[in-house]
Amino acid sequence: MTITHESADIVIVGSGASGAAAAWRLSFAGFKIVCLEQGRWIKPEEYPNAAEDWETQSRGTWAFDPNVRGWDVDYPLNVEESCIDPLMFNAVGGSTIHYTAHVPRFHPSDFSVKTLDAVADDWPIDYDELEPYYDLNDELMGCSGINGDPANPPRKERLMPPLPLGSDGERMAGAFDRLGWHWWPSDNYVNSVPYRGRAACNNCGNTGLGCSRQAKGSTDVTYWPEAIKNGVELRTGARVFRVDTADNGEATGVSYFDGDGEVNFQPARAVILAMNGVGTPRIMLNSSSESHPGGLCNSSGLVGKNLMFHPYAMVTGFFNDGMLTYKGALANIIMCQEFYETNQQKDFVRGYSYQMVRSSGPVTTAAGLMTAGVPWGEKHHGAFTARFGNSTILAVIGEDLPEEHNRVELDPKLTDANGIPAPKIFYKLSENSRRLLDDAIANAETALKEAGAFETLANPLLRSSGWHLMGTARMGDDPNASVVDRWGQAHGAENIFVIDGSVFVTCAAVNPTPTIGALALRTADYIKRERSDLKS
Amino acid sequence: MTESEKHLTATDRLNLAVAMDRIVPAVDDLPGAGEMGLGIEAEAIAERIPRYREAMIRVLDAITLDPAARVVGGFRALEDDQQVESLKAIEAAMADYFGDFVHLVYTAYYSDARVHSRIGWRSGAPQPAGWHLPPFDASILETVSKREPFWRKT
């Protein structure tokens, strides 16, 4: 028997980077809002970096990969047809719990790649339109950094100074300077000084494993406290499996399983989907009805299509000066955008960023995470000693281009614990991306050697790198070529919105979280401004 | 009985210890990983991480079934270099499982306080201690700040 709840004005599905931002913004406007999250609240003391066996936990129960982690609230993914594994987290705060909080912005050119480079498509919006929402998201999440980056447009004063570069960061910066290449201290949603009641980072190094200190800006500690104070109901343990629609195609609410396995129905005047580039198309494809054949708002046939990751290559440099490179935030140091734009002399279009990544603890050093592990046997100890605390990684974030054959479908057999079809991922690395990564690897080796590395080791494609899930319900003005419009409102259903990374038209060569947050805030402002009809 | 339900036998445990010694041999004043008694820790970790458990079971089965180990006393009776060759053959035959098994051994070994002491690693949780780093010094931007803005105009 279905449990039917009191109607809401707006039901938001997902409490991560986008759902939290939208809930917070709308909470000031008098809407009755319910947010459904399949995960739960996680207490700061539960995070692995407060535990002695943190490295063991990071390889099991706190792994980035839900197929490895296997929590009850996770859903399985069929990755047999993908060379990259999607990574995500299911809890209040979503994947901001385990992201490293490295938060560069898109460049203005990223919104116009078709115009500029004759590839993919232009976004229906531009950087200027999004800029105030980047600023607002930075303020709420707490952004450390410094102005003046010559690779990016000027922006508002950063709210906190940059995180410490450390001697290893300074070494890398010096190498870039000598090569005449760009570099700049990273923007981070990690506190370098106390900010809004949250402590400053103390450089423990594990920004990717949740922050027991709450120095990292995950949405459970940034947006949610105020949104809840303003009256938003955040309902955990609620696994949505369908957006329900009327004959006219409009949403009537969403159906979900609660923690006891009971089916619930949450009626609402509008539905906002805020999961991620895999979770959102999964639920849209699972919401087929007479008014939405082939999936929710899928008249274009593009729901689930154009899946983009940032395919990562990792180049590790090994040094012999004992800098102890595990001290400091893992991946929040500096980035290089010397090769960000299309270079006509190259055999690929678009470009890439480098994100400097530190080393980690002894288990991670031995077993490897982003690079190959240490060999076993007689040569083990020598190799371990050479690497431990002596390595720096340049992570290559390459711009992936949208291709329809890269997609999310519903698996015909695999389901989650509630019987909801699991996603099946189809992803092949394009020739363009391969060439781009190869170029980036060669340049990274140059930079690391300039920094003093006696040896470099490249991982040409990190399989476990699907941190960024984008493009599967793309934004556009043409209903035949996109799923949602410039405001995130679905073509063909005026009370259904998508606000997560699914709406990306292209993915740039930077981490997507600040762009996701900015887009969500912008859609929320549109609803506030234009959709008072959704208010009861 | 499925792989995940299988329990280790006494022979499995002895083989596990020897295999661990070959994977992480003795160094300085520390014996190999097996002789340090870390098989118990490896089993405990495997109980928490299903793929490690499956890898351990499959590798130990392969050790038992390896033709080279069909001598009186089995795998443990082989010379050290013969044990290494046996493990290399198993690695070649089941690379993924063997890789996870090696990671399991590393996890047990590098979680041990005696090992931490040897390699100069501070045992315990990363928090609340963290690490001290000097604050950011903007003077390092002197060179790059002189560069003209170069983002692509639209």
Image (tube, coloured by chain):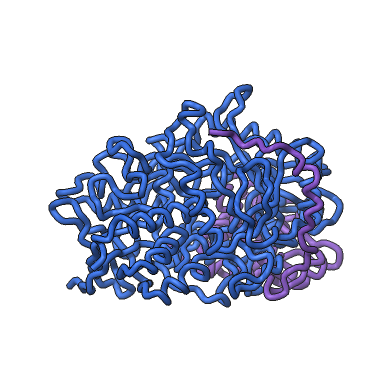
Chain colours: A blue, B purple
Which residue: 56% across, 48% down?
Answer: A105
Which residue: 57% across, 67% down?
Answer: A210
In this view, which residue lies farthest toward the top? A345
Q: Can you tell which quarter of the image residue A367 is in?
A: bottom right
Q: Can you tell which quarter of the image residue A481 is in?
A: top left
B146 and A494: which is toward the camera: B146
In what quadrant of the picture does the C terminus of chain A appear? Answer: bottom left
A306 lies above or below A529 = above
B148 lies above or below A245 = above
Which residue: 43% across, 42% down?
Answer: A125
Lateral position of residue A230 relative to residue B22, left or right = left
B94 and A318: which is toward the camera: A318
A10 lies above or below A465 = below
Lateral position of residue A140 relative to residue A371, left or right = left
Name the spot of residue A498 as percent of width and height, x first.
35, 52
In what quadrant of the picture does the N terminus of chain A appear? Answer: bottom left
Residue B72 visible? The answer is no
Name the spot of residue A352 as percent of width and height, x first.
60, 38
Q: Can you tell which quarter of the image residue A313 is in?
A: top right
Name the spot of residue A439 as percent of width and height, x first.
65, 31
Residue A409 visible? The answer is yes
Which residue: 86% across, 63% down?
Answer: B28
Lateral position of residue A256 relative to residue B28, left or right = left
Q: How many marks?
A: 0
A460 and A403: which is toward the camera: A403
